[in-house]
Amino acid sequence: MPADGDGGAPRYSRCGTNPTQEAVATKIASLEGMDAGLVLGSGMAAVAMTLLSLTRSGDHIVASGALYGATRRFLSHELPRRGVEVTFVEVDQPRQWRSCLRPSTRLLYLELPANPLLRVPDPRPVASLAREMGILLVADTTFASPVNFRGREHGVDVVVQSGSKYLGGHSDLVAGVVCGPEEVVEEVRGMLELYGPALDPHGAWLLDRGVRTLVPRVQWQNEGALSLARWLRERPEVERVYYPGLPDHPDHETATRLLDGYGGVVSIQLQDSKAAEAFCSALRLASVAPSLGGVETLVSQPRHASHRGLSSDGPTDHGISTGIVRISVGLEELEDVKRDFQRGLAAVRQLG
Ligand SMILES: Cc1ncc(COP(=O)(O)O)c(C=O)c1O
């Protein structure tokens, strides 16, 4: 492990200190308005290394219940194995944040917008609570990207993101990012050095290539998703559209106040899992794939991806029913996407 000669962290790719890794991490941190950044080998590496570096056995975390599935599993199964307890707050019960606090609470954790119903919990009261307690608020803002939401402007101390989504933007990369105060990022770097989920230098270069077009891509996707959401709302086969840009979304007001764009992901509720299957199978332009944030339109069913535990039809305790299809709008001409979705909806109609 060669030293860089100036007494700083060694220049070694597993530590995220290769020049290409550092350049892109600094670029993303500056987009977030944060002091420092670090790139890692996946979004989950960013989530896991951040949470491991900020907690010790005996600590407690309060987290939003509306989370990416693997993050939720990490919090509810993996951290408790290491002596860290976690309490989840219902997304519709923001007062629970305070009542769940314990003397051992070390950090608060939330995600926005949260997959797949695009919930937007207001981070500002949670940030005030964190400040009052002298602890950190960590937020996963993967679905927003710094184009639509910069956590620091609303009191978030540490931002984690999957670079595999909007930041990378081409569905050809798995990466993660953590941005925050210098001392926190250095703690995470310490974990990265020990556990090793680094982003290889070529991946860092791909991430940098993606970030160069981040702003126009996300703006185009914001516009396309809003238009698509309004169009889908008028289709009789669609029981419900979940998009924070629509006035009937439960978090429309919060999203309008906090976000610069409502994002490129729209979820729809079809009658049941058969309808969701028929819709997805009939598509020719959009691909069925579990990711989001890339240049091509993707559709996925949460019951096959982030919420794999769902088996029966009807709503579950997380309000996520098996007829849900999540759409990640790409950069195609919107009329072509709508034509493709017409095909999907025709297949739903044929089910009778
Ligand atoms: C909100 C959110 N956070 C984290 C992740 C994990 O990212 P990765 O797949 O890059 O590990 C995902 C993946 O879909 C995600 O949607």
Image: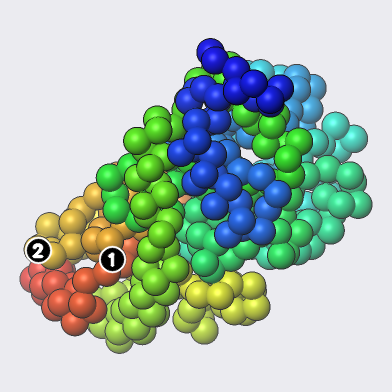
Name the image quarter holding residue 8. top right
Left or right of 258, for residue 118: left
**Mark 2: which amino acid?**
Arg
Tell me which numbered mark, 1 or 2, is placed earlier along the sequence.
2
User: Image height check: is 62 above or below 264?
Assistant: above
Residue denoted by label 2: 284
Which residue, as the protein is rendered here, is positioned at the far front? 5
Residue denoted by label 1: 330
**Mark 1: which amino acid?**
Gly
In this view of the protein, which residue sits in the foreground, 213 or 90?
Answer: 213
Q: Secondary structure at mark 2?
A: loop
**Mark 2, other Cα within 10 Å: few <14 / some 14–19 / many ≥20:** some
Question: Which residue occupies 54% across, 39% down?
Answer: 22
User: Image height check: is 237 above or below 94?
Assistant: below
Q: Quadrant of the C terminus?
A: bottom left
Distance between the alpha carbons at the discs numbered 1 and 2: 14 Å
Which mark lies nearer to you, 1 or 2? 1
| Residue 301 in view, yes or no | no
x, y percent for residue 239: 33, 74
Question: Which residue occupies 79% across, 62% down?
Answer: 125
**Mark 1, other Cα within 10 Å: few <14 / some 14–19 / many ≥20:** many
User: Image height check: is 197 above or below 312?
Assistant: above
Q: Secondary structure at mark 1?
A: loop
x, y percent for residue 237: 24, 76
User: Image height check: is 58 above or below 219?
Assistant: above
Left or right of 157, for residue 332: left
x, y percent for residue 235: 26, 82
In this view of the protein, which residue sits in the foreground, 140 or 342?
Answer: 140
Question: Which residue occupies 28% across, 45% down?
Answer: 172
| Residue 223 in view, yes or no | yes
x, y percent for residue 18: 50, 31
